[in-house]
Amino acid sequence: MPRDVKPLSKTARAAVVGIARTHPKLAPLLERKRSELVVEPNFTDRRASKDDDQVVLAVYDQERGESVVAVVDRGRKRVVSVETAPVQFQLSQAEQREAEELAGADRRVRRFLRGRAANPLTRLYFPPAATEAVGGHRHAIVFLRPSTSERRYAVVDLTEDRVVDVLHPAALTER
């Protein structure tokens, strides 16, 4: 019988993170702000299984520039496995909010918006290799859309909590 898969509540998410903090590899990673990227039920299909109490937790290790994925068993209150993943996960909601706040505080962005709403769309960004000063940083690009015809793009280094650049539309199409 299919089951209804729902996101975890804030309380359940906090409990999973609490269990993960007991693991020596995860504990230091979870001390950083915006550390959890994913905290979702672990399921391979919608049928009930013995793994109903398992949750996938993904964090980004800023020092090593890699994603770490763990499986946490809520029932047994322990971390089942921890692996490094060769990918960067999409931005968490907290990272999106922070990138938008940092962009909104930037004087170049404020000048462009002239008091209008930013109507932001924020995504994970991979800067060109030549411009990335330090490996392992996580970047966001905030699409600023105050009208249907005006655009600017704020590149935010989430590791350093700063706006790296504010780009005009032509900058994204230049070679």
Image: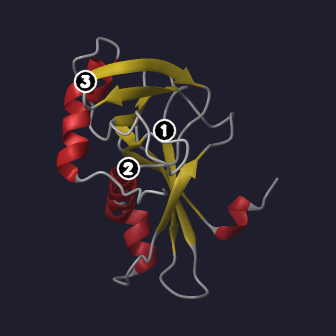
Crowding near pointer 3: few (<14 within 10 Å), some, many (20+)?
Answer: few
Q: Residue furthest right?
A: 175
Type of the residue with mark 2: Glu
Q: Residue furthest top?
A: 24
Residue 157's x, y, as percent?
45, 43
Q: Is residue 81 left or right of residue 128?
A: left
Closer-to-camera residue (116/93): 93
> Considering only order in the chain, which callout, 1 or 3, is on the residue closer to the N terminus?
3
As measured in the structure, the alpha-carbon distance from the residue carrying label 2 to the one carrying label 3 is 30 Å
Can the viewer see residue 64 in this picture? no
Closer-to-camera residue (97/73): 73
Task: Give the residue number, with chain letter if any, for mark 3.
Answer: 76
Query: Residue 19 sits in which quadrant?
Result: top left
Marks 2 and 1: in contact by CB < 8 Å? yes
Can the viewer see residue 3 in this picture? yes
Q: How many marks?
A: 3
> Which residue is pictured at 37% across the width and 71% down the height?
110
Residue 54's x, y, as percent?
37, 34
Q: Is residue 67 left or right of residue 99?
A: right
As measured in the structure, the alpha-carbon distance from the residue carrying label 1 to the one carrying label 2 is 10 Å
Q: Nearer the viewer, mark 2 or mark 3?
A: 3
Crowding near pointer 1: few (<14 within 10 Å), some, many (20+)?
Answer: many
Task: Give the residue number, with chain letter if any, for mark 1.
Answer: 138
As measured in the structure, the alpha-carbon distance from the residue carrying label 3 to the one carrying label 1 is 33 Å
Task: Give the residue number, with chain letter if any, for mark 2.
Answer: 95
